[in-house]
């Protein structure tokens, strides 16, 4: 059927079938900014988004905003997924300090990339009292079950802590982790959301880790990252003086508290400044293999 006949039957003006919409030069920027605003504020409708766009200097009326809103398929969802918010400020380092060895552990994640751009994810666990690095595990990705494996192995060699402090990361608040800690008798100290300073020891360790290792090394692959992480942990525990410990190493400080009855731990990894092999290893709480 011809266009003339079809328009005549439907009562549609022929000019509307030949109209080609003209896209303004600023439309791509407006749509891109709309996507950013909708992701940031998913409960805002097109009217509020229009007000934000106008406030940022975009020149468009409300009808155009609505047209672009519908074209991109935006809508305010009727149902919201509730977020789990655990933690209070009383669980922070200022209110609940470690009083002895294995009293409070803290753990966190830190991210980087290898030479090819592949993701690297470190799990750091530290004893807040002795400042010992108990675990420094790196993988491409790490889920709650992977965290549980590391924690289980560490408890078998190190002992069970009284408390463990963390933020509200999904790996730490997972039901499998919380259930395991409850069965093991470990009290959880979840810090207040959006307050990383309340987990200050973990943040401080991560800052030194990034400054002394991650920012200074270009990791070729995951295997190299694992090797360098083991070396860094050994150096941190056995050779790096810690200012808050009177410039003792964490191993020396832990050994001074442990007394002669403690099992002798492993010696640090060999390096040019290490003690001769003929000297006996220093008693320390560092687990074998560090």
Image: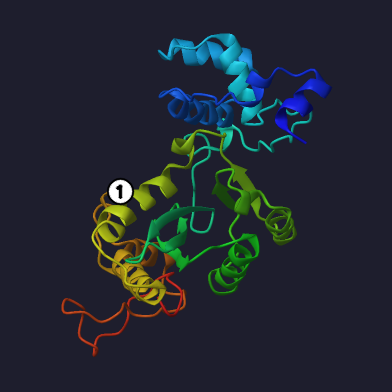
Q: Quadrant of residue 83?
A: top right
Q: Residue at x 68, y 21 (%)?
A: 14
Q: Is residue 106 left or right of residue 146?
A: left
Q: Residue at x 58, y 73 (%)?
A: 153
Q: Residue at x 29, y 69 (%)?
A: 235
Residue at numbered disc 1: 244
Residue 110: give x, y in percent of width and height: 43, 54
Q: Nearer the viewer, residue 93 or 136?
A: 136
Residue 121: give x, y in percent of width and height: 46, 60
Q: Nearer the viewer, residue 66 or 91?
A: 66
Q: Residue at x 45, y 67 (%)?
A: 138
Which residue of the protein is positioned furthest toward the bottom in this rendering? 278
**Residue 126 visible in this rendered orientation of the protein:** yes
Viewport quadrant of the C terminus: bottom left
Q: Nearer the viewer, residue 75 or 139?
A: 75
State whether residue 32 is above or below residue 149: above
């Amino acid at each position: 059927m011809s266009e003339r006949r079809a328009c005549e039957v439907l009562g549609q003006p022929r000019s509307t079938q030949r109209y080609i919409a003209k896209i303004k030069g600023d439309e791509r920027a407006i749509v891109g900014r709309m996507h950013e605003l909708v992701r940031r504020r998913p409960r805002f409708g097109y009217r509020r988004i229009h007000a934000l766009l106008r406030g940022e200097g975009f020149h468009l009326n409300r009808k155009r905003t609505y047209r672009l809103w519908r074209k991109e398929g935006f809508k305010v969802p009727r149902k919201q997924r509730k977020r789990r918010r655990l933690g209070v400020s009383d669980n922070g380092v200022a209110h609940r300090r470690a009083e002895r060895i294995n009293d409070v552990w803290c753990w966190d994640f830190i991210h980087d990339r290898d030479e090819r751009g592949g993701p690297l994810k470190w799990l750091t666990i530290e004893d807040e009292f002795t400042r010992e690095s108990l675990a420094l595990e790196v993988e491409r990705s790490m889920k709650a079950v992977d965290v549980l494996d590391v924690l289980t192995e560490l408890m078998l060699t190190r002992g069970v802590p009284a408390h463990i402090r963390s933020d509200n990361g999904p790996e730490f608040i997972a039901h499998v982790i919380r259930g395991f800690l409850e069965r093991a008798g470990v009290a959880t100290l979840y810090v207040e959301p959006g307050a990383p300073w309340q987990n200050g020891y973990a943040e401080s360790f991560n800052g030194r880790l990034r400054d002394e290792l991650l920012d200074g090394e270009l990791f070729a692959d995951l295997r190299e990252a694992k090797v360098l992480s083991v070396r860094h942990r050994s150096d941190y525990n056995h050779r790096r003086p810690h200012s808050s410990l009177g410039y003792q190493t964490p191993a020396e400080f832990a050994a001074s508290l442990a007394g002669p009855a403690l099992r002798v731990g492993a010696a640090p990894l060999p390096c040019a400044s290490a003690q001769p092999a003929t000297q006996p290893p220093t008693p320390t709480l560092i687990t074998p293999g560090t």
